[in-house]
Image (cartoon, helix red, strand yellow):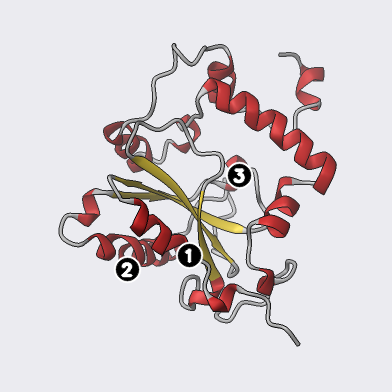
Amino acid sequence: MGRDANAELPFNLTETDRLVLSQTDEDFEAHDWENLQKLIGANKLELLKRKPSDLRRYIQWSASVRVEYGSVANYVLVNRLPKSWGQPPFTPASSTPFADPSDYRVLINEWPYGLAPGITHLVVWSRTLIPTDDGIGDLTPESRKLVADFVKRYFVERLGPGGEDRVLWFKNWVSLQSVRSVDHVHVLVRDVGPEIIEEWTKEQDYHKERSI
């Protein structure tokens, strides 16, 4: 894919994306839990990949969304995030990320990575800014602890004993994000039933737009 073709894409392809696009679904090796632990533990987030057919559909979808909404971020704001948040810059209830339930919304990722069966990809959208460093846009040590504490409280403890072995999380560096105007954290869970997923992702009253 040449330089001119890249200019027509809705987002910049990573080297991993280029490799995936050269493959068929039959060639693709899904991320299993052990592989995810290694990649996320080493902060090799650029190596996370979608299935070839999903990546091609995601590119097409992103392009169509850009035409209709102007950007993927606008699509997310209109169709996925709480109406009560309004438009960025948001005014969160708390300046501390994840301190107030009305400031975050857990949703199933519409375009998950290529994951082995039994693994669910969730996204936690945050109305409160999550501070990052000035380099590649990775989390600061303070922010990393805030996110880790939230994930433990919201996801791990809900799963009971052994829950820490069934939950992984990461926040893409700014350079890897397809939606940059709204902070979000990715959470991967394994062997979690639909009733708990529904509990985590249920819209609450405080997410709804209040009528005047």
Q: In which quadrant of the rendered image does the C terminus lie?
A: bottom right
Residue at 27%, 45% (x, y): give it. Answer: 191
Sequence-first disc among 3 and 1: 3
Q: Nearer the viewer, mark 3 or mark 1?
A: 1
Q: Which of the numbered marks, if any, corresponds to residue 189? A: none
Q: Earlier in the sequence, mark 1 or mark 2?
A: 2
Question: Where 27 sits versus 116, above or below?
Answer: above
| Residue 31 sits above or below residue 21 on the image | below
SS at badge 1: loop
Q: Quadrant of residue 199?
A: bottom left
Q: Which residue is mark 1?
A: 202
Q: CA distance from mark 1 to mark 2?
A: 17 Å
Q: Amino acid at mark 3?
A: Gln
Q: Residues within 10 Å of mark 3 (few under 14, many from 20)?
A: some
Nearer to us: label 3 or label 2: 2
47 to 138, vertically: above or below: above
Residue type for callout 1: Lys
Q: Is residue 113 left or right of residue 75?
A: left
Residue indicated by mark 2: 153
Name the disc covering residue 177, or none: 3
- Between disc 1 and disc 2, the foreground one is 1
